[in-house]
Image (cartoon, grey):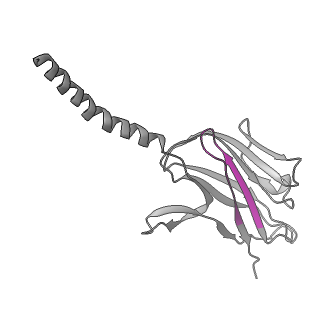
Amino acid sequence: MDTWIWIERASWLVAIVGIPSLVIGLLALTRRPRLSVGFLPFRKAGIFGRRDEPRAETKASPTFTKTPELSDTFQVDMVILNLGSGSARDLLVNFKFPPKLGREHLIVALGPAHHLDRMPTDDGLTWSFHHSYLHPGDRIFCEFGVQVPASLDRIEIAYEISMADSPTVRGSANVVVSRPT
């Protein structure tokens, strides 16, 4: 009879240790990335304004010293930020530029992992690159140079980020170009 009492006590020990472990394991399955794309500097967001998020719009005041039809090159700083609780894996990042910007207007990082191509489905250039992972709180900085034609007052950059284990993130960010007076 003592044997059954010890077996029952051992089963309670398994339940006491096993049930919290099961709950922790199930909570780990609900962790998902939440990507936010935009411009530097960050803006304060959230209930108490304690979370940094990228801006959806930025302003640029390029100079036109060489020719009045085309601005001098200026840098645009974009960032991809993981605000979620899980890691994003196998990211494929696509930035789509407006048709008025040609290859001669953009300076982007190129190489085996970075491509700047004109897609057959639309007129604009697409800057594509792969990134292995993005952990919670991590950032991918995407800097590029641009020369703006004088006829363009806004650069709408559409983005699409696909991941191996989460839904695709789509949106757009704008560079508002102001002319010097």
* Residue 12 position in % (x across, y down): 22, 30
Predominant secondary structure, magenta span: strand
> Is residue 45 left or right of 106 when viewed as pictured?
left
- Who's the residue at 66% across and 68% down the image? 57
* Residue 58 position in % (x across, y down): 66, 68
Residue 174 in the image: above or below residue 26: below
Q: How many marks?
A: 0
Q: Nearer the viewer, residue 111 or 71?
A: 111
Residue 90 in the image: above or below residue 43: above
- Queried whether the magenta region covers residue 51, the answer comes back as no
- Who's the residue at 37% across and 40% down the image? 23
Residue 143 in the image: above or below residue 91: below
* Residue 15 position in % (x across, y down): 27, 32
Q: Nearer the viewer, residue 111 or 156?
A: 156
* Residue 52 position in % (x across, y down): 50, 62
Q: Nearer the viewer, residue 7 or 43?
A: 7
> Is residue 6 left or right of 125 when viewed as pictured?
left
- Who's the residue at 79% across and 72% down the image? 153
Give the magenta range.
155-174
Name the residue furthest front.
1
Residue 159 lies in quadrant? bottom right
- Who's the residue at 19% across and 21% down the image? 7
> Is residue 149 left or right of 27 when viewed as pictured?
right
> Is residue 139 left or right of 154 when viewed as pictured?
left
Residue 155 lies in quadrant? bottom right
Residue 151 in the image: above or below residue 27: below
Quarter of the picture holding the C terminus: bottom right
Name the residue furthest bottom.
181
